Image (cartoon, rainbow, N blue to C red):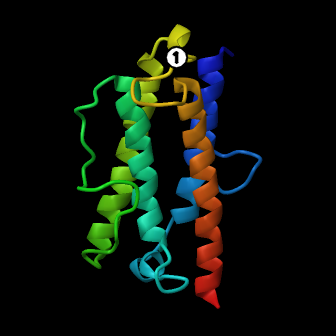
């Protein structure tokens, strides 16, 4: 395996493919219902739904850098965290999960097309290399997968 194949494997295992480390991001939200997704562990704390869109946003952010198009905009106005739900329906939750899947697909496609010899470069406006941005997305997915698992357990009590 070359370095890009290894990184793609990391991205996919953190997002949706089985791995030794346990639950990945999509596994953490599999079968989630609106009530659980919208529940806050405490006032002012993020809920699972917000974490879903937050993860989509950071996949978009790295995808935009890999694509080299600073004019690309995220599907929802704002950045980083987005208050959810704005529409407390199953359809709205499914739309936001689809947004996460779609940005993951765009990230993978842009990474596949990205020249391997530029992975160590730092994109304009960033202090982090492309390789660290992409590896960071996988770590970010796993971090929030664990956070989501914890929120679900707290909600069960």
Asked if 27 appears above or below 66 in the picture, the reply is: below
Quadrant placement of the C terminus: bottom right
Can residue 15 be seen by looking at this rendering?
A: yes
Residue 16 visible (yes or no): no
**Residue 19 placement (x, y as % from top left):** 71, 45
Q: Residues within 10 Å of mark 1 (few under 14, many from 20)?
A: few
Q: Locate residue 120: give its quadrant.
A: top right
Whole-percent x and y of residue 4? Answer: 59, 20
Spot the residue most to the right.
20
For image coordinates 54% across by 30% down, the residue present is: 128
Q: Quadrant of residue 73?
A: top left
Q: Quadrant of residue 66?
A: top left
| Residue denoted by label 1 | 121
In the drawing, does residue 7 fall left or right of residue 103? right
Q: Position of residue 156 (x, y in %)?
A: 61, 87
> Residue at left 57%, top 29%?
8
Furthest residue toward top: 117
Vertically, is 120 above or below 95?
Answer: above
Q: Is residue 10 above or below residue 17?
A: above
- Numbered disc 1: secondary structure: loop
Residue occupying the point 58% across, 67% down: 148
**Residue drawn at 27 percent across, 69 percent down:** 91
Residue 133, horizontal then vertical, whole percent: 54, 33
Quarter in which the N terminus is drawn: top right
**How many numbered marks appear?**
1
Q: Is residue 94 above or below residue 132?
A: below
């Amino acid at each position: 395996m070359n370095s890009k194949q290894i990184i793609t494997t990391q991205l996919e295992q953190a997002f949706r493919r089985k791995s030794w480390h346990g639950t990945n991001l999509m596994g953490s939200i599999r079968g989630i219902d609106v009530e659980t997704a919208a529940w806050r562990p405490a006032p002012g704390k993020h809920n699972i739904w917000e974490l879903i869109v937050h993860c989509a946003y950071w996949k978009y952010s790295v995808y935009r850098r890999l694509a080299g198009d600073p004019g690309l905009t995220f599907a929802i106005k704002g950045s980083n965290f987005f208050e959810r739900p704005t529409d407390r329906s199953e359809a709205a939750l499914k739309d936001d999960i689809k947004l996460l899947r779609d940005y993951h697909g765009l990230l993978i496609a842009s990474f596949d097309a990205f020249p391997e010899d530029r992975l160590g470069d730092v994109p304009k406006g960033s202090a982090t290399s492309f390789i660290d941005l992409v590896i960071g997305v996988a770590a970010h997915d796993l971090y929030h997968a664990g956070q989501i698992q914890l929120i679900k357990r707290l909600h069960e009590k």
